[in-house]
Amino acid sequence: MCGIAGILSLSADSLVSIDELRPLAAALVHRGPDDERFALLGGGRCGLAFRRLAIIDVAGGQQPIANEDGAITAVFNGEIYNFRELREELTSLGHRFRTQSDSETIVHGYEQWGQEFLQRLAGMFAIALWDERTSQLLLARDRLGKKPLVTAHFGNRLYFASEAKAILALPGIPRKLCPRALHDYLVLQYVPAPRSIFRGFEKLLPGAMRIIRADCPADAAAAPLVPDPRTGGQRRYWQLPPPDRRFGGSYADALERLDLLLTRAVERRLISDVPLGAFLSGGVDSSIVVSLMHRLGVSPLRTFSIGFSDPRYDETAAARLVASRFRTEHTEQVVTPRAAELLDHLAYHYDEPFADSSALPTWHVADITRRSVTVALSGDGGDEAFGGYDRYRAVRWAARLDRAALLRTAAAGVAALLPHGRPKSLSNRAYRFLTAMSAAPRDRYAEWVSVFSEGALWNDYRPEWSDRLRADGAVDDCVRRWLDAASGIEGVCTATAAMRADYQTYLPGDLLTKVDIASMACSLECRAPLLDHELVEFALTLPEEWKLRGRRGKHILRDWARRLLPREILDRPKSGFGVPVGEWFRGELRETLERELLAEDALSGRILRRAALQRLLSQHRDGRANHAHRLWALLMLERWHRRWHVDLA
């Protein structure tokens, strides 16, 4: 795991220097505290910077790394789990390896198979590769977006880095706001790729690549999503399986296949030359990962958990049960409201406004884990693959209610009678479900995954901000259209379509961003076996009925796990990695919140009507509504703006 960055000059009159690369690397030292190296290629047309966190081939795995004749040079961030198989195949084809690292398979793989080598890689990665023979740069990101890669184009230079802060560290790089990205953030609590909050920046999409020639016209290098290698536009090299692809075997066959894929996914992620452990929440997914690590003979097996003093959010008892079952060396820590002191730290590390409050406990668990190990396995990905989120069941229930017109008509009236000030309560969940029933089926999912609904936002925006958004191309239903496109199905109105949409949107934009940035801020590598691409492709072909049954999701996964996990773990309701920010905003953080959102120079006040801000604060304070997620999004927006000093003009 590492930090990578670089510069491609689009003009032969303006060559890259090592001095320009140093600030890029310095800004990524947390991602790679063990080593720093640079390379100038193409006679100075391309410069690569690398910060290393040594995990595989600690002594010999330095980057940038080249093939035998130096024609192909690469830096990459991540892990290639099948590198030994690839190395054996490439050696049989005549390639000569100098190291034992996984990174060397990238340059030889590209030399042998060209761009198609990406489809042979199993792992998580962001790659920058220079081909001296064609004077072109290849940028690529893993299939599901576990590892980030950001680009920016200014003047006659294309910049790229693991994190935007590296590019922003260079003198003369503008920090201008992208209004549409800010709108997306308020709706979704993150800025989805390929957009960036910084105008002129772009994120590489999951499963995508870019090829930019050094003689590419300067204005063409910034062209987004154009499948033409001369322009440097993004191209997908991998897609989710088609919506109509179905598993052809029986339920018993599926269980057998699931056992093979899960075991192989965990086993592959145990490859390491440094100590490793696991995050353990006490939920089904992380418990499965720990159980398989135990079955595969990991010793000592170290596990790490985070808890809260509020029992509605605390899962430490369940985590202890699993730790005891598998005799792990277990460490836990309780997160308190004082954790909010980390807000400025998070605003710096995430680069963009990021409002998933579980970034707080994620950073804490990464911090305590890094004190003992360098690599941690997590349970991320089980919900998307096997239907673990409540909203997937909500999609199915809503489809049934649609058949009863009277019930659908009455839904909004019933919702108005329900108290909804407590986020974990059944009444609050029922309120969110019923209020969305008045929307068209294709619009409901957008409501369920939104922090601010788009309709409410347009009503609460200041007129001048609405005008600016429309001038920038934003429309009232942009998120719904985007979700439709992501699912590959017109209208996110089935649970399978919702899962597919999440794989393209929420998973890379929120969950994987949260884990990568929080863990790498602590110089910890995090691996997610349940996001193995072969396991994901298999899971998406399974019938909904094998995942969603009764009031619970992940049926087939729980069924498989009965041989390993205690019933208390398998039968407990899903908790999620929530944070009691709603209670904090009525208590210890109330004054901080109100002071920052209502300040004269607050960014929130420049885009939202003051009356709307006061309404959100008072309704939440008095318990009439639960606006915890909205208020957290606004607070993180303020902290981000204060940290990065972005030009709003």
Image (tube, grey):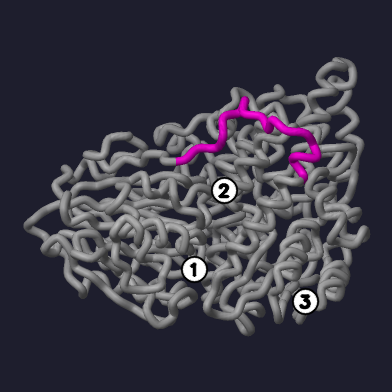
Chief SS of the magenta region? loop
Q: Tell me the element at label 3.
A: strand
Q: Are marks 2 and 3 in contact (CB under 8 Å)?
A: no
**Residue 476 visible in the picture:** no
Query: What's under tag 1, amino acid-wise?
Result: Tyr
Looking at the rendering, the stretch of residues picked out in magenta corresponds to 238-255
Q: Which residue is mark 3?
A: 334
Q: Which residue ends up furthest to the front in the rendered image?
A: 92
**Residue 640: numbered disc:** none
Residue placed under numbered mark 1 in the picture? 348
- In the image, taking residue 154 as reference, residue 575 lies left or right, namely right
Pick the residue in front: 539 or 189.
539
Res 95 quadrant in image: bottom left
In what element is the residue under mark 1?
Answer: helix
At which x and y percent is residue 158?
A: 25, 54
Q: Crowdedness of circle 1 by 10 Å Cα count: few (<14), some, many (20+)?
A: some
Q: Which residue is mark 2?
A: 533
**Magenta includes 249?**
yes
Q: Secondary structure at mark 2?
A: helix
Residue 448 shown left or right of residue 561 in the figure: left
Q: Closer to the camera, 381 or 434?
A: 381
- Neighbour tally class for label 2: few under 14, some 14-19, many 20 plus, Cα within 10 Å: some
Locate residue 27 relative to residue 506 in the image: left or right: left
